[in-house]
Image (cartoon, coloured by chain):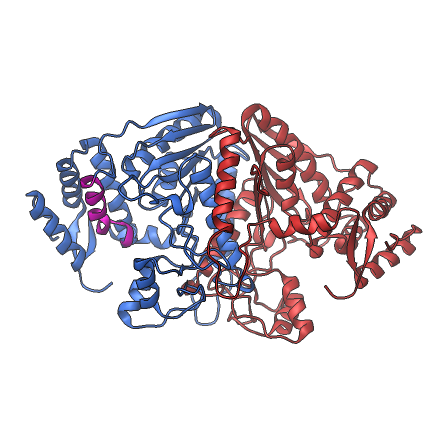
Chain colours: A blue, B red
Amino acid sequence: MGDYIRTPISDLERFVVEVMKKLDVPEEDAKIVADVLIRADKRGVESHGVARLRRYINGLKNGLMNPHPDIKIVKETPVSMLVDGDAGLGMVVTYKTMKRCIEKAKESYMCFAAIRNSNHYGIAGYYSLMALEAGMIGFSVTNAAPLVVPTFGKDAVLGTNPISFAVPAKNEKPFVLDMATSTVPRGKLEVYNRMGKKIPLSWATDETGNPTDDAARVLENLKERKGGGLLPLGGGEEETGGHKGYGLAMLVDILSGVFSGGAYGLNVYGTKNAPPNVCHFVGAIRPDTFVDEDELKEGMDGLIRMLKNAPKREGKDRIYIHGEKEFEKEEQNTETVPLYIKVYEDLKSIGEEFGINPPEEA
Amino acid sequence: MGDYIRTPISDLERFVVEVMKKLDVPEEDAKIVADVLIRADKRGVESHGVARLRRYINGLKNGLMNPHPDIKIVKETPVSMLVDGDAGLGMVVTYKTMKRCIEKAKESYMCFAAIRNSNHYGIAGYYSLMALEAGMIGFSVTNAAPLVVPTFGKDAVLGTNPISFAVPAKNEKPFVLDMATSTVPRGKLEVYNRMGKKIPLSWATDETGNPTDDAARVLENLKERKGGGLLPLGGGEEETGGHKGYGLAMLVDILSGVFSGGAYGLNVYGTKNAPPNVCHFVGAIRPDTFVDEDELKEGMDGLIRMLKNAPKREGKDRIYIHGEKEFEKEEQNTETVPLYIKVYEDLKSIGEEFGINPPEEA
């Protein structure tokens, strides 16, 4: 993990809430932002944790994120909602929508919501976990800034467009898929770049659209919009299934951007000095919609055990279920969470800027 | 394509229907089987076309496929069905379920069905296309015989578990994703093996669970159940995202096998001389559930054009949308379809066996 300190979760929450309140975010909403960010840190997804706080601060400061959004249900059926987020913070817009989705699904067995005009919503898994914690099955996808190159394309058109799906089990931990539809996120290139390590050819393309092992070149090109970008899951060639990852990324953009009537592809963050119009699609399903709840959970236990108990590859001693590593991290991070020194220093400078005590070291 | 002949579609239909009727399949159901298989041939997915007819013949002959299934809706809500296929032909069970799903979705905006105790249902895309042709959005996934190795596993546990999702556009062709969640299907290894060509390391593992470039070895191991198998989309390593393809394959098995209370993982085709208990999950969504239908279709056109018009990679002149290649094939195959000589010879021998005239050469 590199050099890090630990901070008490309660004090980190206090800090994020105070910062958000200074930026005119109501306390209730500030608490949602803190919970979404810190949940990522607890689950070991540091890239989407409080390390991102400055981005939200900047968004609120420059007016691209609205601290008092008038979140509107534009259209509603017993099993669906079309929501306009009024450029609110993605976490606030999506948390509130998912809450209502869960309530509606209790009545109607399932409910899905397409959300437009929102902002970056943190980890996709937060919202499917919300459903799980309410005793439901959860679904969550979002579009994002264009970083991913379609198969045979030269430039990034789609986002890393993650998919999360969460299903409860009985005695086993739940299945919580939470995956970008690109082979890796941009952060992974930054890590390899710092280490001076070549990247696998299935990760990214250069400015001609050809796969490259040069992380620095890709990062520079993305920054300067010179072309190239991240590759979809499966890499740059049809031979290795890259068109499938591209299809999944497109599907996420259809559910998020097209179903909601919001922005998709290059139109997400497409207009300078205007809200980015990030779009999401979330849903909840009652666990007794098909078989009974108990049968569903026993089936999940059966499948999970079948996979975990299957013979291991030479040199490996464990087969993981999706979400398992993150739940284990959460069990280690119940009172305090680790923060990279660099992130902690940034929080301290944010504290100074706003006249707020930084989070304590634990 | 290799050596092939063309046969009139109407005569190929006549042939498949006659064969099915000889095996006691009612004419109405025989027509469904013919339509599903021939649609695959028309769309250029020969691996799932009439080339598979013998497998269905064998299934009916040995009693593992039931020509007169009592297809039962075990449980029903306005937006869902739990269906028991009574070991019927997968195409018949799923066609009838999808028909009803579409009718229910017209009333309730969406409907999803989990189907257990079925058989191989052909191309996943057939059922999402059914929704499309009824003016809806379609979804279709299925589990399958275990051929795919989970990340860090040694042996195949999951099927190639395909995902299909179809969304209508306005002036552009619809988006029809139809993809196995493995990097490639087994048939692709057979092709490389015949050519004596090494396979990419993201396709399959050997009997130790390590990635291999030796197609013959993988095919032999799968046949003899010696270990190893196909790799999920993303390959064998977390570094290249293999755990994501594994997660998608598992998700498909959850929707199909667990949601339906049927078989999953190794239990699909798990009991010798018993029906394989293949499970599916299909659904239909009204295109006016979120934005209005026209806005949805215009959004689809916009996203499709944005992708198709994006700058191309060096040496490439076209970016494809999912389903586009298959629609172009269908346009070439309106009156006749191509059949490999080997497949045609097999149909002729089936004809002899049943005393039925083989399909004519066009």
Q: Give the residue at x 28% y 54%.
A: A47
B142 left or right of A22?
A: right
Give the percent coordinates (x, y) of residue B262.
60, 43
Is residue A145 left or right of B77 when viewed as pictured?
Answer: left
**Residue A168 vertical position relative to residue A305 in the rendered view, above or below:** above
Q: Which of B47 and A45 is in front in this view?
A: B47
Task: Count the numbered circles shown.
Answer: 0
Does the magenta run of residues contain B259? Answer: no
Please check the rendered image and state whether residue A58 is part of the magenta-colored stretch, yes or no.
Answer: yes
State whether residue A305 appears in this view. no
Majority secondary structure of magenta residues: helix
Taking the spot 42% from the left edge, 51% from the top edge, the residue there is: A157
Does residue B278 appear left or right of residue A145 in this picture?
right
Work out which residue is located at the far right of the displayed protein and give it: B355
Q: Find the magenta span and give its range.
A: A47-62
In x, y percent, where is residue B149?
53, 61
Q: In this view, does B28 lie above or below A76?
A: below
Query: What percent of the width, then of the height, locates residue A241?
Result: 53, 60
Please identify the quadrant where the N terminus of chain A is shown.
bottom left
Residue A23 in sight in this render: yes
Of B21 and A294, which appears nearest the observer?
B21
In the figure, is residue B72 to the left or right of B171?
right
Q: Position of residue B29 (x, y in %)?
A: 78, 38
